[in-house]
Image (spheres, rainbow, N blue to C red):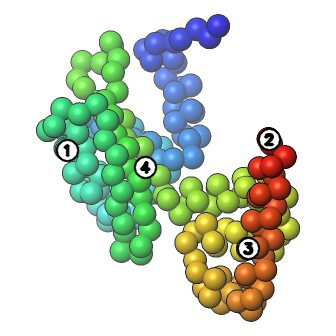
Amino acid sequence: MMNTVAYSDVPESVFQVVVENLIDGAMVLTNTGELVVSNSHASQICRHLTQNLSRVPQQVWRCCQTLIENQLKFIEDEIKTDEAVAIRIRAWWLASGSIDQPHLLVMLEDQHQAAEYRAKAEACRYGLTDRETQVWLLRRAGYSYKAIAAELHIAEDTVKKHIKSIHCKRDANEWSDC
């Protein structure tokens, strides 16, 4: 049986290491929008969204305000940047007996990066070749067959053959799990 540990019992240095090593961006905000702590991934995403590094990006704060104003426990939204990058925002209340003021935990996920991680894991699981992996990474990122062909400097028919091979390997893997 696993013992649970209260947030206040975790040493601050351990908490900082855990937060910094998350793949997603993580921020803790006060209910007035002041940044308490953020990991490097959150800082990078925020820099991408705004030039003013001392403030939480307006798109992120609007999501948090909806959570606060509607007295929700959790909220999830997605924003698109000018470069068509999708950022998934998830925010919820962070409760701790030792904190006087309510805080929000905000997770920021770069959807393109998340798709890349999933594609790499699938490539490994299905035993894809290096070229199939390149094709699959682009396909999972939303590229069309034509765009994949242009990006990899191969014929569109070659892309179709790779995709067919990938699907065969996926199907074989799923049938072997039965």
Callouts 4 and 3 close, C-beta under 8 Å:
no
Between 78 and 27, the one nearer to me in the picture:
78
Q: Is residue 85 above or below residue 174?
A: below
Earlier in the chain: of badge 3 and badge 1, it is 1
Q: Residue furthest left?
A: 69
> CA gap, disc 2 to disc 3?
23 Å
Q: Residue at x 56, y 25 (%)?
A: 14
Q: Which residue is mark 4?
A: 108
Q: Is residue 38 left or right of residue 147?
A: left
Amino acid beneath label 2: Cys
Earlier in the chain: of badge 2 and badge 1, it is 1
Q: Is residue 171 left or right of residue 1?
A: right
Amino acid beneath label 1: Thr
> CA gap, disc 4 to disc 1?
16 Å
Q: Which residue is mark 1?
A: 66
Q: Residues within 10 Å of mark 1 (few under 14, many from 20)?
A: few
Q: Residue at x 48, y 57 (%)?
A: 110
Earlier in the chain: of badge 4 and badge 2, it is 4
* The label number, if any, that marks residue 178 in the structure image: 2
Residue 71 in the image: x percent, y percent?
18, 32
Which of discs 4 and 3 lies nearer the camera? The answer is 3
Q: Which residue is mark 3?
A: 163
The C terminus, quarter of image: top right
Earlier in the chain: of badge 4 and badge 1, it is 1
Earlier in the chain: of badge 4 and badge 3, it is 4
Q: Residue at x 29, y 52 (%)?
A: 60
Amino acid beneath label 4: Leu
Q: Quadrant of residue 80?
A: bottom left
Residue 86 in the image: x percent, y percent?
42, 63
